Amino acid sequence: MLFINTRPQDRAEELSHALRLAHIDVVDLPLLELLPQAWSEDLSALYRQLPDAQVIVVVSPTAVQIGMAYLKQSGITLNQLQHIQWIAVGDRTAQALAQYGITAEVPKVETSEGMLQLPVLQTLDSGQCLAFWRGEGGRMFMMDQLKQQGMRILNFVLYERRCPVFTQQDLANIFSLLEKQKQYAMVVSSEAGWLNWIQLMQHQKHLIAKGHYLVLGERLYQVVSNYKKNQATCFNITRLTDLKTDSILQKLVVVQGNT
């Protein structure tokens, strides 16, 4: 079975390598690329407020990289943030923070819903301050939930997410490849990535129907399921709790066994 690795380029290599070692054909087709937002007065003002926060939620290794670079530019030091509890969306993000001597809590399920279940967020009082280091359009559900609980949110939009130009340019080759497949598998790790996929495939819905989609978390599972229902199409969906290479490989073994 063909596997389409849709992870951003800098996060795709380990998974693609492991799958090829397991004799699974892989095509790298990133659906998102992450581009830093330029330093601005708005970001400068947010960084000046960062010592007021009780919690910082960091959503990706890219958010760590850009967030720390701008922290240095702002003149705020990590010593000024020693009282803060850090939350990382997954192990890779936690590892990136560890390079700065920061120990972060990681949810069991690497989603907004998973993070909302962490004890540190369950015990916050109304009016307390949380910062989000994130990309444009990401984690809106989580921020909205916390705002409804009366939390003050510092919203650091550190990068924008867009569909890579080279992915759009390679579509003819992808269409040709998928036409030859009885079925293919693909990880869906964000709603933005899924929306890019159905936009790219808007005139090739028969190819969407050939997919077996490994979907991260319950909310994204519902998004993909709703598309399936609304479009009256038929494809398989499997839920993931994390994006670890071993987890994806285990699911693919099951998927292959069922085809």
Image (tube, rainbow, N blue to C red):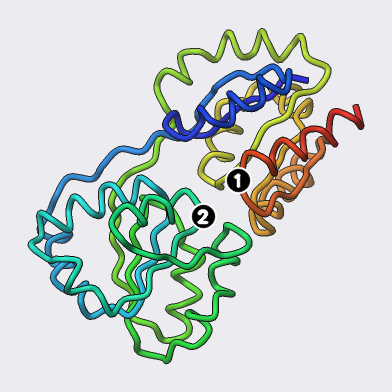
In the rendered image, the vertical position of residue 27 relative to residue 14, given as above or below: above
Label 2 Cα neighbours within 10 Å, binned few <14 / some 14-19 / many ≥20: many
For the residues labelled 1 and 2, the Cα–Cα distance comes to 8 Å
Q: Quadrant of the N terminus?
A: top right
* Total numbered badges shown on the rendered structure: 2
Q: Secondary structure at mark 2?
A: loop
Residue at image coords 13%, 56%: 72
Q: Residue flagged by tag 2: what amino acid is it? A: Gly
Q: Quadrant of the C terminus?
A: top right
Residue at image coords 12%, 66%: 76
Q: Residue flagged by tag 1: what amino acid is it? A: Leu
In the rendered image, the vertical position of residue 8 relative to residue 80, given as above or below: above
Q: Which mark is residue 63?
A: none
Residue at image coords 23%, 54%: 68
Judging by the rendered image, the residue that carries numbered circle 1 is: 243
Q: Say whether marks 1 and 2 touch (CB < 8 Å).
A: yes
Q: Position of residue 87 (x, y in %)?
A: 43, 66
Q: Which mark is residue 90?
A: 2
Q: Position of residue 144 (x, y in %)?
A: 46, 71
In the rendered image, the vertical position of residue 208 relative to residue 158, given as above or below: above
- First in residue order: circle 1 vs circle 2: 2
Residue at image coords 63%, 60%: 109
Front residue of 106/138: it is: 106
Q: Position of residue 229 (x, y in %)?
A: 79, 46
Front residue of 89/181: it is: 89
Report which quarter residue 79 is drawn in: bottom left
Q: Which residue ends up furthest to the right in the rendered image? A: 258
Asked whether, in this view, residue 169 is left or right of residue 214, the answer is left
Q: Position of residue 89 (x, y in %)?
A: 49, 58
Label 1 Cα neighbours within 10 Å, binned few <14 / some 14-19 / many ≥20: many
Q: Secondary structure at mark 1?
A: loop
